[in-house]
Amino acid sequence: MNKNITDAELEVMRLLWHSEQAMTIARLRAALEQSKGWNKSTIHTLVSRLRDKGIITHLDKYGAAQFIPLMTEDEYILAEEKSVLEKFGSAKTLALAMVRNGHLTDGDIDELKEYFRMEGGGND
């Protein structure tokens, strides 16, 4: 399965991941036309790409294709995490860059410290 998902395809995936049921193309279109302003052709192209990549599939129910993800959101996040860490070399390097560039607030850092203490991940 090619897990390379573009930003636009990710918008489709988010809808599928957060839906409690399979979604028809009509439901996807209604949501994406409203939230993104995308036209019918764009949405069909994105769905086709995701299907070709093996990331979603469809079930034929009541004469309409209903789309479901074949990859969970957690699986996607894990794949992206691995990709980012391969680029940065380590989680520590990434975290330091985020702190230095102001992407983590003092509150975020305190929360992470508490998490690591609770998980046994080390001391200050």
Image (spheres, rainbow, N blue to C red):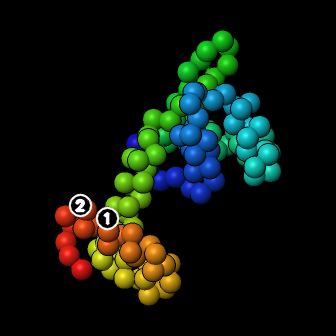
Q: Quadrant of the C terminus?
A: bottom left
Q: What residue would you read off at disc 2?
A: 119
Of 108 and 85, the residue lying toward us: 108
Q: Residue 93 at x, y = what percent?
A: 33, 80
39 relative position to 70: left or right: right
The amino acid type of the residue labelled 2 equals Glu
Q: Quadrant of residue 114?
A: bottom left
78 relative position to 48: left or right: left
Compared to residue 76, the image places residue 81 above or below, namely below
Q: CA distance from mark 1 to mark 2?
A: 6 Å
Compared to residue 123, the image places residue 116 above or below, namely above
Of 34 and 52, the residue lying toward us: 34
The amino acid type of the residue labelled 1 equals Tyr
Residue for point 19% across, 64% down:
120
Q: Is residue 60 visible?
A: yes
Q: Residue 39 at x, y = what percent?
A: 80, 45
Residue for point 44% across, 73% down:
108
- Circle 2 residues within 10 Å: few <14, some 14–19, many ≥20: few
Query: SS class of the residue under badge 2?
Result: helix
Q: What residue would you read off at disc 1?
A: 115
Query: SS class of the residue under badge 1?
Result: helix
- Circle 1 residues within 10 Å: few <14, some 14–19, many ≥20: few
Compared to residue 64, the image places residue 112 above or below, namely below
Of 94 and 49, the residue lying toward us: 94
The tag on residue 3 is none
Q: Are marks 1 and 2 in contact (CB under 8 Å)?
A: yes
Residue for point 61% across, 25% down:
66
Residue for point 50% across, 35% down:
69
58 relative position to 31: left or right: left
Q: Is residue 54 visible?
A: no
Q: Residue 97 at x, y = what percent?
A: 41, 83
